[in-house]
Amino acid sequence: MAKRIDAYLKSIQDVFLDIPGTVSDKNGIFIVPEYQRAYSWRSGEQCEKLWQDLEDFIGRRGKYETYFFGSVIINHDGEELLVIDGQQRLTTFMLLLKALLLRINDILGALPGDEDARYIKNHLEDRRREIMHCLYSFEDDDDFLKVIMGRKELPDLGIKYENRSIIEEYPDEMKKVLHGKSIAGIEGKVEDIKYKQKDNRRTNFYRNFWFFAEKVRPFESTQVNSFAKALLQSCQVIVVISHKTEEAIEIFNSLNSTGLPLADADIISAKLYKNCGADRSAYKDRWKGIVAATSSLAAQKISSIDEVLNQYMYILRAENAEQGTTLPGVRRYFTDINREPLKDPMGFIEKIEKIVSIWQDEESTAELATLKQLLLRHNNNFKFFYAAYFYFNGDETAENKQAFVEALLKLFAILSIQEIGYSSAAFKTFLFSLNVDMGKGAPTERIVGRIEEHIKAKFAREKIRGALVERDPENAVVYLNEYLFARERGRPFGLDSLKIEIEHIMPASGRNIPVIREDAKMSEDEFETYKDKLGNKILLEKPINGAIGRDWFITKQRSYRGSGFPIAKSLADYPGGAWGKDEIDAASKKAADRIAAYIFG
């Protein structure tokens, strides 16, 4: 347990100068730890909002008013101040303070030396001293005076900020900004990002600093003094201090409501990084590659970095013959239950890269690619067992891989059809035992055989068929029906490159619904029952679906002719031009027979 948790309401100035029980009252450095994300606030979004809040507050401020800017959570680890929450906010405040400091320096350099200017000059010198003590580490007051008198340069001072995040591409950018003597000098030092255009060729650090520098450029002496004083002394944050990293992270994840909680991947990456020794540079490059690859996979709704880590946990559990269904979180698994993998960071990275490649790989056959796409529309838990199979059986023939994926698809199709949860023994308990079999090197024939036997032993064909006829199916079932229809007729079927929507043959909504119900001879209750049945749903390309909107079936038929999906194409020639109860019932029964035959055949 932690020694204690302390919370203080502090002004912006006191955040940097006076947090009891820490070293921040002297030269404490706020450290962005390895597992934190990169600095991502943008000038046109969060910085603009911050500036507007400050302007509004200062414009209506009374003598005793203050403005609250949220919370900062610090892990006080020995003499280090690790920023668990508030990294974006603290970084941005420091960039704003730097912009104010340069403006104050410019004004002080231009003020006349007469008695009339002495009053405002004294106040601006106070603001300058306060800001510099927030941004820089001084051994004593002589250091401060040496800088003011030009006998010591800013780069000779330490800054109260260190970015250790392994995700941050430009960890030294803050130092370049804070050590600069002028805007032009800073611009000449900061990063110029290759292949980027205009403002995008600069980092968020510099762009946000420049944003604030432009905002304060018109400020005259009294205005900049008033603004800086209000920011430093009247704007407040709650600073929460913990003395144990895990506890600080838990506090953050509990309190955090606007940003993203610290992910398991962030924490695990930091622990791997610490164990790297001389391999840190290579580790950092490879981890960035993993993050980039999984970000791309996540954008395609295939697999995220946290899902990949969970898949690795399942693979290790398979190797260790662990089939208990009560699972720890992935962070606890690697940091408490099974710590060995973290002791070999490069080995860990290699395993994660192997799992990522499973999801990246172009399947060896078009059929296998389609089956994978169909599975991706079912319950996400299939991914653990899909990844484990391909991890242990990557060298299997395409025929064997297809047999496994089809068997897994059948099982998860049942989960999408029946009103039964994944956590039931019929799914979770069975799949965990199957996972252990895969870890033991069971051949594909045994794995597939076990799934097929389990389906026949635990599920009734007529019950599955009945559910398909009577209930509203999940969209995944509509995809499966379309695939099987195409297969029956020997027609090509692919999902990768198409923008697909679920089409209601009899429109399910719109202004014409009362007339459509009347044409279909349905009451309101009947309409609600029939509109989402399996026999009323097909796949359709998004452009076609958008064009036909909520038209009558007879109008839609012409557009169906241009679809690449076989059910829509077949409906183009459906006689009669009507689609009502009888047609939906008939189509639902045919689809139910088709899917049940596939699952149990």
Image (tube, rainbow, N blue to C red):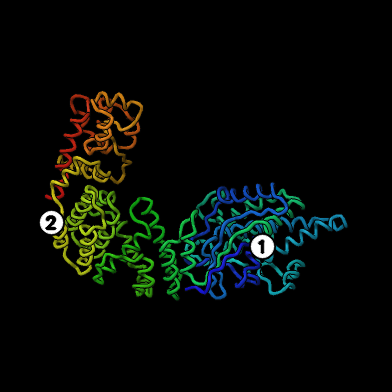
Which circle, 2 or 1, is nearer the viewer?
Answer: 2
User: Measuring 13% from the left and 46% from the top, which residue is drawn there?
Assistant: 462
Left or right, residue 349 beside residue 493: right
Nearer-the-camera pick, 371 or 21: 21
Q: What residue type is labelled 2?
A: Ala
Quadrant of the image occupied by residue 225: bottom right
The residue carrying pointer 2 sits among few (fewer than 14), some (14 to 19) or many (20 or more) residues within 10 Å by Cα, namely few
Numbered tag placed on residue 316 in the rendering: none
Residue 239 coordinates in the image, percent (x, y): 58, 63
Residue of label 2: 457
Q: Would you say 597 lies left or right of 170 here?
A: left
In front here: 586 or 549? 586
Please give the residue where the numbered disc 1 appears in the rendered image: 13
Residue depicted at x 37% and y 68%: 332
**Element under label 2?**
helix
Whole-percent x, y for residue 290 in the image: 39, 61
Instruction: Decide: is 540 above or below 292.
Output: above
Residue 370 visible in the snapshot: no
Mark-to-mark CA distance, 2 and 1: 69 Å
Task: Determine if residue 427 is in view.
Answer: yes
Amino acid found under the numbered disc labelled 1: Gln
Q: Residues within 10 Å of mark 1 (few under 14, many from 20)?
A: many
Q: State the residue at coordinates (25%, 43%).
A: 473
Residues tagged 2 and 1 counted as in contact (Cβ below 8 A)? no
